């Protein structure tokens, strides 16, 4: 199986109805209700946040990553989201975890893809009015229904974890006020921010899926879990909801999600 990402058109909007809705908020301000409402458009009121990165991965690894999640989320009708960036290299998409939600939503009717990102640099328009996020040419992912940009004041800049508090709060709000029945985080590869997201999700008691073989932070944490050293994972108070799945077995991730309510129960006729 090849991935469905059209790498030759990195800037073309593939989001539903041909537009991505952009909202900007200050980190100190409340969450915009209009963005929260976008999440409630999902047919099945569950939410999975994909965390992580792709550092050190080959082109083949990235294709496998996309197909892993395509298989695992086949039939998913909930909200799937991640960071809302896209990397472009030599005029083509350089696939990242952040490209996965849009693909899942395109293939599964009823699924909604959203994204958040921190403003880490001055925003700018370049070329033919292309919206650029930083000095490296990072752009907003054009496959998501909506994107929330979190900034540290009009003149301030944030680190790459500047949106983490907001995305966790949004998920809790969907549970408390919009009837969402399952919340979870799935991590692939990643660095220090991914470690912190895994720990925070686990401490909240959410199912936290960590993909073995994806590299870096995930494999480091899995190694500590399997060697009985969870007490050395910084900040981790509760490891019971950590779920290890293998990158070569997407069916395992899907089964683990089904057991935890992320797919609707199909009643016998």
Image (cartoon, grey):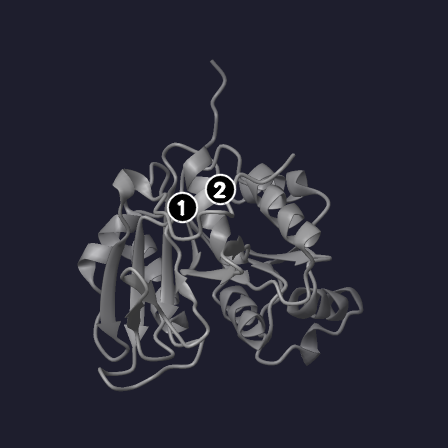
Q: Quadrant of residue 78?
A: top left
Viewed as shown, does residue 257 lie left or right of 80? right
Residue at the image point whose x is 71% and y is 57% from the top = 212
Q: Is residue 107 left or right of residue 174?
A: right
Residue furthest to the front in view is: 127
Near-viewer residue (139 or 54) = 139
The residue depicted at 50 percent of the width and 17 percent of the height is: 268
Nearer to me, 56 or 215: 56
Mark 2 or mark 1, earlier in chain: 1
Q: Is residue 24 visible?
A: yes
* Mark 1 crowd level (few <14, some 14–19, many ≥20, 10 Å Cα): many
Residue 182 visible within the image: no
How packed is label 2: few (under 14 Cα within 10 Å), some, or many (20 or more)? few
Question: Picture coordinates of residue 196 (x, y %)?
Answer: 54, 74
Residue 204 image point, x, y percent: 47, 66
- Say which mark, if any, is on residue 261: 2
Q: Residue at x 37, y 52 (%)?
A: 142
* Mark toward the viewer: 2 or 1: 1
Query: From mark 2 to mark 1, how far is it between C-alphas?
Result: 8 Å
Q: Are marks 2 and 1 in contact (CB under 8 Å)?
A: yes
């Amino acid at each position: 199986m090849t991935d469905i990402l059209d790498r030759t058109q990195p800037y073309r909007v593939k989001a539903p109805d041909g537009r991505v809705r952009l909202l900007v908020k200050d980190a100190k301000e409340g969450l915009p209700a209009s963005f929260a409402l976008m999440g409630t458009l999902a047919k099945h009121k569950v939410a999975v946040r994909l965390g992580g990165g792709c550092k050190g991965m080959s082109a083949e690894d990235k294709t496998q990553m996309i197909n892993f999640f395509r298989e695992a989320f086949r039939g998913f009708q909930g909200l799937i989201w991640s960071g809302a960036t896209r990397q472009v290299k030599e005029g083509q998409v350089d696939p990242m975890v952040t490209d996965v939600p849009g693909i899942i939503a395109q293939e599964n009717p009823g699924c909604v893809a959203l994204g958040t990102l921190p403003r880490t640099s001055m925003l700018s328009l370049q070329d033919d009015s292309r919206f650029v996020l930083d000095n490296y040419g990072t752009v907003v992912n054009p496959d998501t229904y909506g994107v929330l940009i979190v900034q540290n004041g009009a003149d301030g800049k944030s680190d790459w974890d500047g949106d983490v508090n907001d995305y966790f709060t949004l998920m809790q709000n969907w549970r408390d006020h919009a009837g969402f029945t399952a919340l979870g985080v799935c991590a692939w590869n990643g660095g220090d921010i991914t470690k912190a997201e895994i720990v925070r999700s686990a401490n909240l008691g959410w199912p936290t899926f960590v993909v073995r073989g994806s590299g870096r932070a995930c494999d480091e944490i899995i190694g500590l879990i399997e060697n009985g050293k969870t007490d050395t994972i910084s900040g981790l108070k509760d490891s019971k909801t950590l779920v290890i799945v293998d990158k070569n077995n997407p069916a395992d991730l899907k089964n683990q999600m089904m057991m935890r309510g992320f797919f609707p129960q199909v009643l016998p006729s």
